[in-house]
């Protein structure tokens, strides 16, 4: 287990300062769907970065597993290795998390004056974006994480690969921190691994849950994704149903807070400057649930879920028209709509 809080005398010096990017520069918040920060100094030394890459390459147990992407996209996805399969890196991280990384995260949000005792590192992976020229740029689609906070640390220099970095949707561009520096953002930020067209990019990705601020809709969605990947359609459908219910209840609660004019509640809702008010988080999951119901031979339930999905899709299209901006969830939603249309064509 990782030590989450250590005495100040045992911490690794002063944490680096952070630069807030984008429109939320005046007040960084871990709840803000547009809050993105880059550390002004390294979180990992060059030797530490090299040691992690060397152990990952020596293990050579890279896999392609990304819950937001369809199977036909796997060829253009990065490879990953879980840190808990890399003994030396895991040992280093178990010490560095409390002495260095949690204090750095605390310093990113000084106005909140909170310790990181409520944070739990629940997943850590080394990512490899290796462009071999045969399948096009290696990237991940624009998505939201299941985490409360995500910290990404480049493990090699941006000069060793072409393009790459992390695409941040609210900024409209890719962020390419220096080797060892940190990119920190809320799990609600729409982002993706920007395509690497040459060379190899390595990064350490750390995902944190919060025991104090629990997003039940995202937790159930994460569990559903895991079940679906393992081929457990029924269990995945059950978790998706729980997720949709939780998202609806949380949305109702946040709407009440927004009506009361609470600015912090607005930030927690994932609605920032320039974002689309009225989009209900999670409602496009009805499309995935419809696909699962169809595959399990439950056509009546599939039809009912598809109707809810089309209602959510119509709302998103209307909001796009009003705002003049494309929503990052639309591409995945249209792919699911295509799957449903193909199913109906094969099962008239």
Image (cartoon, rainbow, N blue to C red):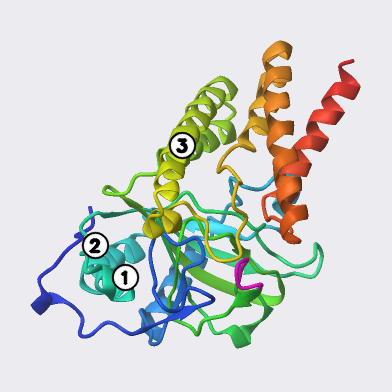
Which tag, 3 or 1, sits closer to the chain's start?
1
Which portion, as a residue range, is magenta? 167-172
Tell me the residue at 49%/28% (across/down).
245
Quadrant in the picture for residue 16:
bottom left
Residue on which the image places disc 2: 116
From the top left corner, tell me how far across and down residue 289 is, in percent: 63, 27
x, y percent for residue 309 = 69, 31
- At x 45% / y 55%, what residue is drawn? 266
In the picture of the structure, the residue carrying the numbered disc 1 is 105
Q: Residue at x 50, y 33 (%)?
A: 248
Q: Is residue 278 left or right of residue 246?
A: right
The location of residue 39, given as percent across then percent down, is 41, 81
All told, the count of numbered labels is: 3
Q: Are marks 2 and 1 in contact (CB under 8 Å)?
A: yes
Does the CB distance between marks 2 and 3 fall below 8 Å?
no
Give the class, few, some or many, for how many residues have Cα within 10 Å of label 3's Cα (few <14, many ≥20): few
Magenta span: chief secondary structure: loop
Does residue 22 sit above or below 331 in this rendering?
below
**Disc 3 from disc 1: Cα separation:** 30 Å
The reply, left or right, for residue 318 in relation to residue 164 is right
Q: Which residue is labeled 3 in the image?
A: 252
Left/right placement of residue 279 relative to residue 55 reads right
């Amino acid at each position: 287990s990782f030590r989450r809080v250590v005495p100040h005398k045992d911490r690794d010096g002063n944490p680096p300062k952070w630069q807030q990017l984008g429109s939320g520069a005046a007040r960084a918040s871990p709840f803000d769907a547009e809050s993105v920060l880059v550390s002004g100094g390294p979180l990992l030394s060059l030797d530490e970065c090299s040691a992690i890459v060397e152990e990952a390459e020596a293990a050579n147990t890279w896999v392609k597993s990304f819950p937001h992407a369809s199977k036909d996209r796997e060829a253009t996805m990065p490879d990953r290795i879980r840190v808990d399969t890399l003994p030396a890196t895991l040992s280093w991280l178990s010490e560095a998390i409390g002495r260095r990384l949690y204090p750095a995260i605390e310093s990113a949000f000084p106005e909140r004056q909170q310790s990181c005792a409520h944070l739990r590192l629940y997943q850590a992976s080394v990512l490899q974006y290796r462009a071999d020229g045969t399948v096009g740029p290696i990237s991940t689609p624009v998505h939201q994480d299941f985490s409360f906070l995500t910290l990404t640390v480049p493990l090699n220099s941006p000069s060793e690969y072409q393009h790459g970095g992390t695409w941040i949707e609210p900024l409209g561009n890719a962020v390419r921190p220096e080797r060892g520096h940190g990119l920190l953002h809320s799990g609600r930020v729409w982002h993706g691994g920007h395509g690497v067209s040459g060379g190899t990019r390595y990064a350490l990705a750390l995902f944190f849950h919060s025991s104090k601020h629990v997003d039940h809709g995202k937790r159930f969605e994460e569990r559903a994704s895991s079940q679906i990947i393992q081929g457990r359609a029924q269990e995945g459908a059950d978790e998706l149903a729980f997720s949709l219910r939780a998202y609806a209840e949380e949305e109702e609660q946040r709407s009440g807070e927004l009506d009361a004019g609470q600015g912090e509640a607005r930030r927690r809702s994932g609605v920032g400057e320039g974002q689309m008010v009225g989009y209900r988080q999670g409602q496009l999951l009805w499309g995935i649930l419809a696909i699962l119901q169809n595959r399990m031979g439950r056509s009546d339930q599939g039809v009912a879920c598809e109707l809810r999905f089309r209602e959510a899709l119509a709302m998103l299209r209307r909001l796009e028209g009003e705002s003049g901006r494309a929503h990052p969830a639309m591409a995945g939603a249209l792919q699911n709509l295509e799957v449903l249309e193909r199913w109906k064509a094969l099962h008239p």
